[in-house]
Image: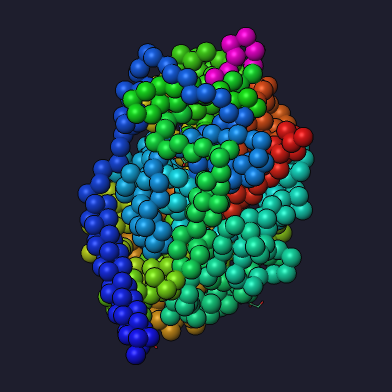
């Protein structure tokens, strides 16, 4: 009798509890979407201005290591360094903590329209981004614990083995495919039953599929086999082929590197994380080229903290070059123009690599099943369903359009299911009103699927440079995508694959047709028309890297193969900035690999 009563109470409480949770999530989602739609991105670091302009400077003590930025790389590095009991580390992060909303993969877009994004735009562009307001593309970057891994699309695509051999061929010892594979495996906890020998099980970072697979998955696989793409583990032996997306999610929730790594380390007494802090420069010299610490501002106050061993800059491919340049490390002429005393003349900010991203839409006669948000939330709380799919992404194909010339995939195609949020894309991409209005008119959110092209090995390079010598200003970001004709041609070629895919049996079954964007209609020649479309609609794939590239020659590269800044002591860069060449995948897994490897290099150097 008594125990029956207990069971009934328990069941009742469970029901009440789960409906409270569902209501909580429903309200959270509604509120955040509403806020996102009216959010205005900041124009500069106004938030920190008072501290930056303060004449007073307070001492913040001394640590062995000071790490700038708790993003993908910073979270991994801080966790690994704090494994050594007598290393004392300070981790400084400009943003705030993660929350329940940014954990929901399907909601990833809305984080870009919030305080979790720094809010950067590119400079007005000449060769791409032409369909965007003022020809400026958005350049979202995570400004919170976990960095860009807390707002990204969670696709786990490492890049090919051969990419890293090319890094090594530049003279970077220890960075060949064979050297880096153990570091990819070290971080990973793979659930996908991929190729033997290529995956880690038991690492901190979970990789799984979004389950159950979308209804459209069969069509996408059939379409890919229609263009001769075999089903593969693209993080395994063979990089060419197609499959569902491997995601860095766990039970359907985002696994930022803060969740995966830092959460294990935050309670350690030898690691201190401070949020809402803007690091403004590294302190170097003045009598020598030795890095002594950093300056930072928080709560309207300026501080100086010293590093006994090293300062490690992990602020990401946009902010790292900004901090280096503000510290006097960068192209001499540019620093002089900005009125910054030059400490080391290095090509900081040059070699900005970005994967051009061309989103396309297909009309189909498939209709996504209507379910209520409550039902989706209930599924999400069990780790399942559409809310576990970042922006509705379901499948990927990695194709070599240059067989015989390239040994790595040159084009990636991403497949997304119908997305009720299609209208937010206009705001997210900064589309011109005319383009956006046109799209809203012809898009059918419940039956249009997205198919996006990425150029994986672009030859064009952009540049990050300063607006002024003030840390209050955002840096300038000139993406310069498609400035090399070759890159535009590769995308035109890739459009050919889209036409072929539309004609496969897999897509014929859903009567797929490429949506004809009524743009560039005054251009008659078909190739010219395609090029015009491509230059209008191509935007960033959120993969900036390369701005403090690794290599032996200090005329061309910023850091050596131990990631130490050339000619400067006790200063390292550990993040996506150090990629010397593009990866033919996405950038997060590669960044984590870089941080895992750097942690070992640093441990080896200082451990007694
Ligand atoms: C919208 C979006 C989608 C993406 N999708 C994918 C994907 O699906 N798959 C994939 O592999 N990659 C994806 N990426 C890219 C990937 O997330 C990044 O390449 C990766 O997170 C970069 O790591 P990082 O450590 O170099 O920089 P970040 O993770 O950006 O970390 C830098 C950190 O430093 C902090 N910081 C910067 N400046 C300062 C300062 N002055 N003082 C204090 N702190 C500072 C920042 O706030 C941030 O937390 C995406 C990125 C975005 C933005
Ligand atoms: C696929 O391969 C077959 C046989 O080699 C070939 O005839 C066909 O043209 C290929 N299709 C595509 C889209 O490349
Ligand atoms: C610092 O390094 C630069 C080269 O990177 C060198 O020209 C300069 O003399 C060094 N300064 C000091 C004080 O050692
Ligand atoms: C297929 O699509 C075309 C073009 O959008 C449309 O005219 C046709 O009615 C569709 N057919 C079916 C069977 O849905
Ligand atoms: C969609 O179109 C295809 C090809 O025209 C057709 O065979 C199929 O029956 C259509 N499906 C629906 C649900 O209308």
Q: Can you say which quadrant of the picture contains the N terminus?
A: bottom left
Colour setting: rainbow
Decide: is 409 above or below 137. Answer: below
Q: Which of 217 and 223 is in front in this view?
A: 217
Task: From the viewer's perspective, tell me whether residue 605 is left or right of residue 381.
Answer: right
Question: From this viewpoint, which residue is outermost toward the bottom?
Answer: 1
Number of numbered markers: 0
Residue 573 colored magenta? Answer: no
Which residue: 46% across, 13% down?
339
The answer, for residue 608, to whether it is visible in the render is yes
Q: Residue 57, percent across and down?
A: 42, 16
* Highlighted range, magenta: 282-289
Q: In which quarter of the image is the C terminus?
A: top right
Query: Residue placed at 55% from the left, 51% from the top?
Result: 264
Q: Is residue 236 left or right of residue 141?
A: right
Answer whether residue 287 is magenta in the image: yes
Ligand 5: image quarter: bottom left
**What secondary structure is the magenta-colored segment mainly?**
loop
Q: Which residue is pictured at 65% across the width and 27% down the height?
A: 309
Location of residue 15 with respect to 438 vertically, above or below:
below
130 or 274, nearer to the observer: 274
- Judged from this view, the residue extending furthest toward the front is 2
Q: Quadrant of residue 292?
A: top right
Give residue 378's position: percent from left, percent from top.
35, 74
Whether residue 130 is visible: no
Q: Nearer the viewer, residue 91 or 427?
A: 91
- Image coords of residue 56 (percent x, y): 39, 14
Residue shown at 54%/19% (left/top)?
283
* Nearer to us in this view, 76 or 122: 76
The percent coordinates of residue 477 (x first, y second) are 44, 35
């Amino acid at each position: 009798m008594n125990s029956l009563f207990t069971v009934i109470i328990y069941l009742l409480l469970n029901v009440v509890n789960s409906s409270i949770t569902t209501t909580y999530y429903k309200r959270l989602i509604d509120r955040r979407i509403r806020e996102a739609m009216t959010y205005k991105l900041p124009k500069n670091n106004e938030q920190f201005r008072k501290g930056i302009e303060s004449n007073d400077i307070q001492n913040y003590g001394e640590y062995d290591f000071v790490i700038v930025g708790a993003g993908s790389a910073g979270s991994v590095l801080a966790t690994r360094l704090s494994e050594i009991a007598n290393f004392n580390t300070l981790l400084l992060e400009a943003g705030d903590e993660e929350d329940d909303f940014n954990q929901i993969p399907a909601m990833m877009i809305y984080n870009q329209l919030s305080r979790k994004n720094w809010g950067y735009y590119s400079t007005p562009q000449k060769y791409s981004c032409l369909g965007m307001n003022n020809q400026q593309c958005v350049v979202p970057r995570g400004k919170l614990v976990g960095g860009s891994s807390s707002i990204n699309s969670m696709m786990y695509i490492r890049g090919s083995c051969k990419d890293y051999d090319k890094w090594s061929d530049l003279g970077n010892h220890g960075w060949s495919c064979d050297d880096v594979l153990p570091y990819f495996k070290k971080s990973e906890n793979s659930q996908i039953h991929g190729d033997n020998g290529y995956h880690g099980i038991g690492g901190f970072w979970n990789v799984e599929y979004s389950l159950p697979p979308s209804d459209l998955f069969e069509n996408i696989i059939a379409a890919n086999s229609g263009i001769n793409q075999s089903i593969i583990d693209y993080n395994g032996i063979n990089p060419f082929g197609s499959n569902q997306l491997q995601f860095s999610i766990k039970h359907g929730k985002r696994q930022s590197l803060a969740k995966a790594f830092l959460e294990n380390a935050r309670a350690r007494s030898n690691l201190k994380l401070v949020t809402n802090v803007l690091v403004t420069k590294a302190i170097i010299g003045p009598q020598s080229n030795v890095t002594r610490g950093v300056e930072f501002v928080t709560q309207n106050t300026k501080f100086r903290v010293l590093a006994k061993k090293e300062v490690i800059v992990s602020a990401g491919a946009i902010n790292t070059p900004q901090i280096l340049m503000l510290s006097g490390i960068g192209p001499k002429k540019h620093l002089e123009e900005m009125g910054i005393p030059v400490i080391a003349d290095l090509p900081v900010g040059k070699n900005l690599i970005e994967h051009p991203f061309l989103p396309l839409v297909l009309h189909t006669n498939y209709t996504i099943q209507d379910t209520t948000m409550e039902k989706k939330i209930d599924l999400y709380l069990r780790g399942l369903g559409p809310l576990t799919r970042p922006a509705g992404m379901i499948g990927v194909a990695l194709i070599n359009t240059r067989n015989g010339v390239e040994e790595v995939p040159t084009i990636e195609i991403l497949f997304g299911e119908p997305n009720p949020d299609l209208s937010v894309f206009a705001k997210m991409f900064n589309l011109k009103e005319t383009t956006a209005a046109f799209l809203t008119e012809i898009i059918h959110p419940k039956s249009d699927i997205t198919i996006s092209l990425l150029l994986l090995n672009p030859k064009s390079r952009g540049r990050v440079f300063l607006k002024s010598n003030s840390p209050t200003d955002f840096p300038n970001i000139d993406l310069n995508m498609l400035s090399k004709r070759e890159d535009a041609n590769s995308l035109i070629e890739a459009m050919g694959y889209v036409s072929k895919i539309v004609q496969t049996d897999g897509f014929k079954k859903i009567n797929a047709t490429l949506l004809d964007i009524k743009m560039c209609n005054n251009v008659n020649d078909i190739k010219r028309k395609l090029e015009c479309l491509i230059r209008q609609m191509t935007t960033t794939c959120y993969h900036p890297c390369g701005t403090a590239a690794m290599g032996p020659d200090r005329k061309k590269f910023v850091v050596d193969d131990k990631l130490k800044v050339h000619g400067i002591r006790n200063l390292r860069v550990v993040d996506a900035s150090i990629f010397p060449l593009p990866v033919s995948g996405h950038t997060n897994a590669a960044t984590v690999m870089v941080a895992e490897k750097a942690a070992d290099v640093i441990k080896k150097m200082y451990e007694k």
